[in-house]
Amino acid sequence: MAEKSPMAAVVFDTKKISEAIEKAANALVPKYEFPEPPEEIFKIFDYLPELFQDDSEKDYIEALSTAMQTSYENGLYQFAFMQYHMLFMTAVYFVLLKIYWLHEDETKKALYYLLKDHYSEFFGSGNTKNGKLYFGSFAAIGESEVFKILHIKGMDSNLEGELKNLVKERNSYAHANGRLLLTSEEFFLEKIAAFNRCIDRVYALIKNDMMAFYLNILTEPDFYDPDIRAYMDSDQQIQEEFVRAYSLSRYELNWFRKYRIDQMKDCEGYEYIKELHIALCRYYKSLQDEE
């Protein structure tokens, strides 16, 4: 059988998406003045990467953000819910990618269990970037099933049930049945709160591993030594070789910045290690100052 050619890359035009949603909103909803989006609907961005691997990832997140905010501002809460769910699943996929990096053998076993005869296709050119898995690779697995990978990090049945319920509810809103089922802002915000509670618990599963990973990276000469590392400037080294390279979120950076770096004072290269940790703290503060 001939091998299927990889799907063409999808290019998102956020301006066109925004215009299309506004046009739909004008047709469906009277000209009411809706309030500014509350902080709750921006919480999910704390769990998404601050610096992306490439422009396609950045464009994808920006397109979803534009769509979600436009839907909310026009009172199209059912569509805002579905777009928020996509942002939520993107954040979950980034967690799964990190679990793969940290526990490759265990994750491959879980993937084989979930995919069976399609296991090799998961690592094929049509589901990877430059031969490597990326966050979108995990979309090849059914949304309810993909959560099972989180059992590697001790997910309990309660969290798994909540995650599956979110998918089930999204599916009930996604059918083209001619009805708008979610029309209350208050009810919509209750749903958003459920998403935010769940993603917090999902990230908590990898906290200890990610902290250990951070400390290990700091002690690698190729990372801390200014004579051999990629960037002499400490800010650039942290942002490019750590934050961008490992798709780190603001939520994770908050864990790292709280570490008492003087606990590593006996490590070789401590002067440079401390400088890089300070650069990370400085970068985190700059993100907070931008708000």
Image (tube, rainbow, N blue to C red):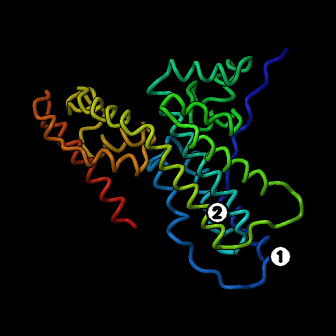
Q: Above or below — where is 150 with respect to 108?
A: below
Residue sitting at x 68%, y 39%: 143
Q: Amino acid at mark 1?
A: Ala
Q: Nearer the viewer, residue 249 or 232?
A: 249
Task: Where is residue 192? Give x, y as percent.
Answer: 59, 61
Q: Amino acid at mark 2?
A: Met
Q: Earlier in the sequence, mark 1 or mark 2?
A: 1
Residue sitting at x 74%, y 67%: 182
Q: Above or below — where is 203 with respect to 216?
A: below
- Dot 1 crowding, Cα within 10 Å, few <14, some 14–19, many 20+: few
Q: Above or below — where is 205 with respect to 288?
A: above
Residue sitting at x 46%, y 41%: 247
Q: Quadrant of the N terminus?
A: top right
Q: Secondary structure at mark 2?
A: helix
Q: Is residue 248 left or right of residue 105?
A: left
Residue sitting at x 70%, y 44%: 10
- The quadrant holding residue 24 is bottom right
Reading the image, the residue beneath label 1 is 27
- Tell which residue pokes out farthest to the front in this image: 158
Q: Which mark is residue 268?
A: none
Q: Secondary structure at mark 1?
A: helix
Q: Nearer the viewer, residue 225 or 194?
A: 194
- Dot 2 crowding, Cα within 10 Å, few <14, some 14–19, many 20+: many
Q: Is residue 198 visible?
A: yes
Reading the image, the residue beneath label 2 is 68
Q: Is residue 190 left or right of residue 234?
A: right
Task: Where is residue 289? Give x, y as percent.
Answer: 33, 65
Q: Is residue 241 visible?
A: no
| Cα–Cα span, label 1 and label 2 | 18 Å
Q: Above or below — where is 131 with respect to 88?
A: above
Contact check, label 1 and label 2, Cβ < 8 Å:
no
